[in-house]
Amino acid sequence: MNFDLRDAPSPNHDARPDGTMIDALVIHYTGMTSARDALARLRDPEARVSSHYLVDLDGIVWRLVPENRRAWHAGASFWRGRTRLNDRSIGIEIANPGHSHGYPDFPVLQMAVVCDLCLDILSRHAIAPRDIVGHSDISPDRKDDPGEKFDWRGLAEAGVGLWPQTTPDLGIAGIMRDATVLRDVRAALAVIGYRVAPEGALDPALSQVLRAFQRHWRPESVNGQADAGTIARLVAVARLCGAG
């Protein structure tokens, strides 16, 4: 263990359903202006929210809920046909004020500790790379975190999550609105794990899911559009998930 782990127990947890395997890891940002306030909220019984861990700006890891207990971090959620992600996941909160408060970069030390913590968790639980996700992935209609500044690529290169090594040149340009192309876009999103309708135009619901995908796998352009670069990256990630 290459980080400073300290206990700060939260009362906000309960038993996981009998027989439920821990097979997902969900990463959040706190969305609060200070780590101290976030820690207090995650331990406030009236707030009824928690996570298993909180990673502070200085790299200190606060352990709030035992991994074998269900923390209350995911809320209404969906990933790869599974709902109620709290039942089966471990939640990590990362101290960052988020999009509502300027959304600063994640410090290098903090990201390094997040990586070490994830690897430590993965040493105990059989969590597939495709099931290491952000809150926005499992709740794209409600959440933006941990957002496009979070270094998903760096984590994947260190063995946490997945990132395509190459992106195919599909020979397309512009924003796609063709029904056949959008059907393929929806199918690829579903292969990765998102909940999307199999048919339909580029409507607000699809844009929300595309924006979540972009925050994770195409952070250079979070526009909610089925543009050429997004579709190419989408195909690359879907191929990884389809092979997994």
Image (cartoon, helix red, strand yellow):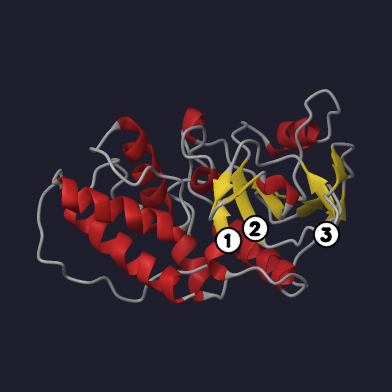
Residue 192 in view, yes or no = yes
Distance from the alpha carbon under mark 2 to that under mark 3: 18 Å
The first of marks 2 and 3 along the sequence is 3
Q: Residue at x 73, y 31 (%)?
A: 37
* Residue tagged 1: 132
Taking depth in this image into account, of 88 and 129 the one nearest to the observer is 88
Circle 1: element type: strand
Residue 218 in view, yes or no = no
Kind of residue at disc 1: Ile
Q: Nearer the viewer, mark 2 or mark 3?
A: 3
In the figure, 159 relative to 185: above or below?
below
Distance from the alpha carbon under mark 1 to that under mark 3: 21 Å
Spot occupied by residue 67 in the image (x, y as percentages of width and height):
82, 57
Spot occupied by residue 65 in the image (x, y as percentages of width and height):
84, 48
Kind of residue at disc 2: Leu
Taking depth in this image into account, of 204 and 28 the one nearest to the observer is 204
The first of marks 1 and 3 along the sequence is 3
The first of marks 1 and 2 along the sequence is 2
Spot occupied by residue 111 in the image (x, y as percentages of width and height):
58, 60
Disc assigned to residue 19 = 3
Spot occupied by residue 43 in the image (x, y as percentages of width and height):
83, 35
Q: Residue at x 65, y 58 (%)?
A: 25
Q: Is residue 219 left or right of residue 113?
A: left
Disc assigned to residue 25 = 2
> Marks 1 and 2: CB-CB under 8 Å?
yes
Circle 2: element type: strand
